[in-house]
Image (spheres, rainbow, N blue to C red):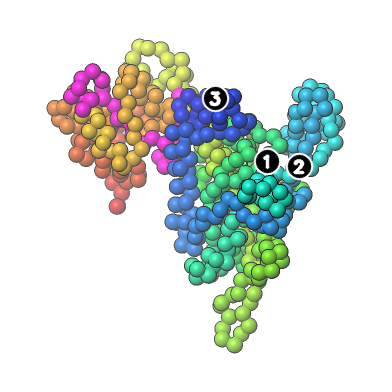
Amino acid sequence: MQKIISLCKRRGFVFPSSEIYGGFGSCYDFGPLGVEMKNNIKKAWWEEMIRNHENIVGLDAAILMSPKVWQASGHLTAGFADELVECKSCHKRFKLDEITQHPELSNLTSGVCPECGGELTEPRKFNLMMRTHIGPVEDEAALTYLRAETCQGIFMNYENALNSMRLKIPFGMAQIGKSFRNEITTKNFVFRTREFEQMEMEWFCRPKEAEKYFDCWKKERLNWYLNLGIKKDNLRLREVPEEERPHYAEETVDIEYKFPFGWGELEAINNRGDFDLSNHSKNSGKDLRYVDPSAGSGQVKERYFPYIIETSGGIDRSFLAILCDAYQEIKGGRTKTTKAVKEIEVLLKLNKKIAPIKVAILPLVRNKPDLVKKAKEVYQLLKPYFTCQYDELGSIGRRYRRGDEVGVLYGVTVDFETLKNNDVTLRWRDSMEQIRVDIKNLLEVIKKLLKDEIEFNKAGKLIKVSSK
Ligand code: GAP
């Protein structure tokens, strides 16, 4: 983890928040490469959920909602609280449920602090909702909460979407956005923070069909991670036992990733039953039952609370898992062309869709104005279409390695041949193979490579052309 954290800071993926003031406990800022990568994850999810399904619609609900929402959802009561124990000597705090999952903390059950051996307090409930006040007077009437899950915004707009988009069950509503939880313990970099981003889809279906869809979404979501290139051995599904399930769930399966610190939840697939719509109906007085339009004339139309199958993933955790999975160290380095001995070379084998920079444009040397001019022209040619980086500092080998370390997919080198023949070297990150491409074809070639429409062999011969 330390290597990943250090790469993130050094190369502009993630910075500690408010660093010049000494940092701000477990808050992180996504830097220039981090925000590109995070946006790519969100785009991949949105494409998968909204574009690839004809019956899922999107939403962007406000973070602030009436506090009545959180009363009805059960988040203000014991349902959304962690049990906290604190050491009376060193004042370190632990979540009680961490104990069951981590045997090395088991002496907590005997009331002894695993850090210093001090005496622990009795467990007490600690609600995770983040409080805030609306308006200038901070009294109880102005109290509300930063949302703890994006899906409550979906439940608030279930009827609006149903009516305005003339939807019929089964259908889904999807949303990406920030959520906040006053976590007792934050740890493992961006894995558990108090401010994070979720990508959630709520699938409204007939109660009878809930099991079928639960099974189906579980598989679809696991495949999404596999298709982003995460190794199969590092992913697993975990049935969550009843005592660990959230208060709203009848059934939960977590998609877990094998992080350097152990298996951790990436995404929860929940069968929320009719918990949300029936509770919001009861508390708001608004009948949120679905009126099934399929009954024939003269027949009574069936009314029921749809069941909800939820897929709830965390973007920050996907980001971390993808980074960990892509990170490779090559002892002695990959290039054998120079005599320089490298201890270790880092390669970030990010998926095409996720890599924050697609193309690096590199003039062979920087003290030849003609070369630099040509390289900048190539940069201007490609920049409107892909995230590109222009890099002229250091030897060409060093610049390739700098790109490999942050997952740059293709290197385009402008050299002396370019000035004669108007072609460039195109270099692959993973194989380090290189071919010459005419500048007039370069844009199209990279576009097609990114869409997997073409491939070249080692000799630079075109070996695959898709039907498109
Ligand atoms: N609406 C259901 C729900 O929120 P959850 O299991 O509490 O379910 C879903 O959260 C996902 O949100 C988790 O799988 C994780 O990826 C992400 N998540 C939850 N708490 C988080 C935290 N404190 N920091 C980062 N990500 C978090």
Any part of residue 213 in sight? no
The local crowd at label 1, few if under 14, some if 14 to 19, many if 20 or more residues have their Cα within 10 Å, is: some
Q: Earlier in the sequence, mark 1 or mark 3?
A: 3
Residue 447 falls in image quadrant: top left
Any part of residue 418 in sight? yes
**Element type at mark 2:** strand
Is the residue at mark 3 in contact range of ligand 1, meaning its CB lies under 8 Å from it?
A: no
Name the residue: 44% across, 56% down. 51
Q: Quadrant of the N terminus?
A: top right
Q: Earlier in the sequence, mark 2 or mark 1?
A: 2
Q: In the image, is 95 to the left or to the right of 54?
A: right
Name the residue: 32% across, 20% down. 393
Query: Residue type at mark 2?
Result: Phe
Is residue 357 covered in magenta? yes
Name the residue: 40% across, 40% down. 352
Q: Ligand 1 is in which quadrant of the figure?
A: top right
Say if mark 2 contacts mark 1, CB within 8 Å: yes
| Above or below, 90 relative to 193 | above
Say if mark 2 contacts mark 3, CB within 8 Å: no
**Along the line of sight, the residue nearer the viewer: 215 or 157:** 157
**Separation of marks 2 and 3 at Cα, in angstroms:** 31 Å
Q: Which residue is mark 1?
A: 182
Query: Residue type at mark 3?
Result: Ile
Q: Which residue is mark 3?
A: 20
Number of the front mark, 2 or 3: 3
**Along the line of sight, the residue nearer the viewer: 141 or 291:** 141
| Above or below, 2 relative to 386 | above
Number of the front mark, 1 or 3: 3
* Residue extending furthest toward the bottom: 298
Q: Which stretch did the figure color magenta?
A: 346-373
Q: Which residue is mark 2?
A: 126
Q: In the image, is 182 to the left or to the right of 62?
A: right
